Image (cartoon, grey):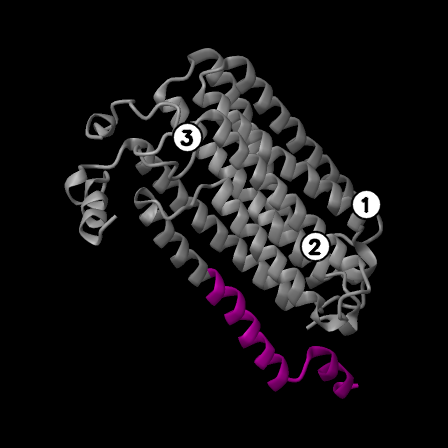
Amino acid sequence: MSAEALIDARSQVTGHGAGGPAPKRIIVGYGFWIFLLSDVIMFSSFFAAYAVLFKNTAGGPAAQQLFDLHNTAAETACLLGSTFTCAMAGLAVGERNQKWTQLALLATGLLGVAFISLELREFAGLVARGAGPTRSAFLSSFFTLVGCHGVHVTVGLLWLGTMMAQFYAKGFRQNIRHRFLCFSLFWHALDIIWVAIFSLVYLVGTLPQELLP
Amino acid sequence: MTNEHEFDAGSNVGKDRAVGAESAGEHRTLGQEFRGYALGLALAVALTAASFWVRGTHLVYGPSLAVALLVLAVAQMGIHLIFFLHITTDPDNTNNVLALAFGVLIVFLIVFGSLWVMEHLNHNMVSTDDLMRMQR
């Protein structure tokens, strides 16, 4: 394709030059994407606080003694699986298939519940060992960062239930599909945050002291 | 092309599942979309497994582990962005990419800026523990 033809083709796309306004789907996605990026920026502040306070254990337990990487691996598997089933729900919505939409969303929800259960069990175990959020600055920042992600997943589960009910009761109307588009973006973005958490908080955090930067 | 792009006419049904999704020019079949997600999942699983493997192995030079894990994490975030959030080079997606670039800039400033400033503070100020010891 020549350069002129390429430029011409681009100007025909909606939202660019002669292409006319972008479809609502694009605009809805863009708006929600802006929200997600602001959410990511909020998380980055918590990551910064965690990194800064990491060594301030106030004589209490450090990350190396606290975290169980098997639990982290199980949580990661749950969340990664739920991201995939959420994408499958997206395909089912595209096909207007009520049964598969509901099944895929149910699987997404169950994996999300499994993730939250594992996380709550870990938190309860930490508190029982005297390593609650009030023990040290390090633990405060840990519970804030990971807990904030957990709260997001919990809110996402409520949203997921709402989406299942709305698809069931109202069908695949355009505005419902747009809500689902936002939900799936939210859910995938939470997995991106979790990638940062399991890599930096758990895997890097539990490295022996002399190997840390 | 023009008919398919009538403003919000509901003509994009079946393709409204991501920030950008595809432009109207290319129609991907269900099978193609499924293979795209399956590939994304496979890559994400491979990178996750690599992260946990690198953490447990003694084959990797110790002091480089933290950086290796960081690189694997960034790679996996990229995989998620491309395969699940559909951030692409599609013209429909330009605004999303620009917003993402700005977001990454802010995240970088917050995280590395905080670490940088606090590191210097720790160097230049007497820690509270030392202060208490001196007062005794």
- Residue of label 2: B51
Magenta span dominant secondary structure: helix
Mark 2 residue element: helix
* Tag in front: 1 or 3: 3
Near-viewer residue (A34 or B101): B101
In the image, residue B36 lies at what x, y percent? 52, 36
- Residue of label 1: A125
Near-viewer residue (A136 or B135): A136
- Residue of label 3: B28
First to last magenta residue range: B107-136
- Neighbourhood count class around disc 1 (C-alpha, 10 Å): few under 14, some 14–19, many 20 upward: some
Q: Is residue B36 above or below residue B65?
A: above
- Look at the image and tell me in which quarter the C terminus of chain B lies: bottom right
- As measured in the structure, the alpha-carbon distance from the residue carrying label 1 to the one carrying label 2 is 25 Å
Q: Is residue A56 above or below residue A77?
A: below
**Which quarter of the figure has residue A33?**
top left
